[in-house]
Image: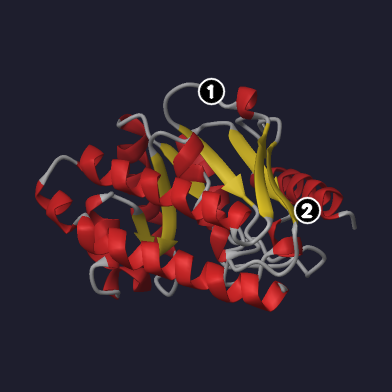
Amino acid sequence: MIALRKALYAVWYYGWTAFLAILFIPAWVLPRKALMLGIGLWSRLLTWGLRVIGGVRVEIRGLGRLPEGGFLIAAKHQSMFDIVPPFAFLPGACFVLKKELLAIPVFGQHLRKARMIPVDRAAHASALRKLVAAARGRLAEGRQLLIYPEGTRHRSGAEADYKSGVAALYRELGLACIPIATNSGTYLSAAGLPERPGTVVFEILDPIPAGLKRGEFMRVLQDQLETASDRLAGA
């Protein structure tokens, strides 16, 4: 039964993703808001399908901790599905992502139009400078900046490896940082497909105040994200 759910949801996931990507190509010549409406629709369809087809519900906790306007989020990343729900509860979601994604036909152009922030992970110092400059511009637009501090997916319990990008944003932007924990890897595969029924929780934690030194910030962030994610996973 699980294998059938997984296969059917894969058709739903990739089918709607491809269909909407093509349907919203005309949005490239329209204001960005038109494309963001399409991405919001994609988010709701994939979340609905995950519940109905895959038997996995999605729960967002702590929405009252989110301020108005632009802010910085650092989120735990365990599954490809993690990128889906934020578009439903963050009106101006802007992801920091690896630049290689821009090379994907159609999808990459959507990312450019949505003004996501690509990062060249091989460029080190120059990449961080460009990241901070782009982040300032997106925040000035009132957007919510979301970064995955580990840079890739790690299941709960796996050894954490937090990168320097989040610390650079925290220091240079002078903002509090809002962590989001999750247990998505407990119920979903790394590719975002259902592996067993249950409830995927995205929990918005208390903000980490601005002004901490780099080492202390990274320690607090990692401790909060890993502890909360392990708790949600039942570890």
SS of the residue under disc 2: helix
> Mark number for residue 226?
2
Q: State the residue at coordinates (75%, 49%).
A: 219
Whether the residues at callouts 2 and 1 have beta carbons within 8 Å, the answer is: no
Residue 107's place in the image compared with 133, above or below, is below
Residue type, mark 2 in image: Glu
Work out whether residue 76 can be spotted: yes
Work out whether residue 120 can be spotted: no
Mark 2 → mark 1, Cα distance in angstroms: 23 Å
Residue type, mark 1 in image: Pro
Residue 192's place in the image compared with 38, above or below, is below
The first of marks 2 and 1 along the sequence is 1
> Mark number for residue 1?
none
Screen quadrant of the N terminus: bottom right
Occupied quadrant, residue 124: bottom left
> Mark number for residue 67?
1
Q: State the residue at coordinates (30%, 74%).
A: 104
Drawn side of residue 210 relative to residue 121, left or right:
right
Drawn side of residue 25 relative to residue 205, left or right:
left
Callout 2: 10 Å neighbours few (<14), some, many (20+)?
Answer: many
As drawn, the residue found furthest toward the right would be 235
State the image coordinates of residue 13 (x, y, percent, origin top left).
47, 65
**Foreground residue among 197 and 128:** 197
**Foreground residue among 167 and 71:** 71
State the image coordinates of residue 211 (x, y, percent, origin top left).
61, 31
Q: State the residue at coordinates (33%, 39%).
A: 138
SS of the residue under disc 1: loop
State the image coordinates of residue 200 (x, y, percent, origin top left).
70, 51
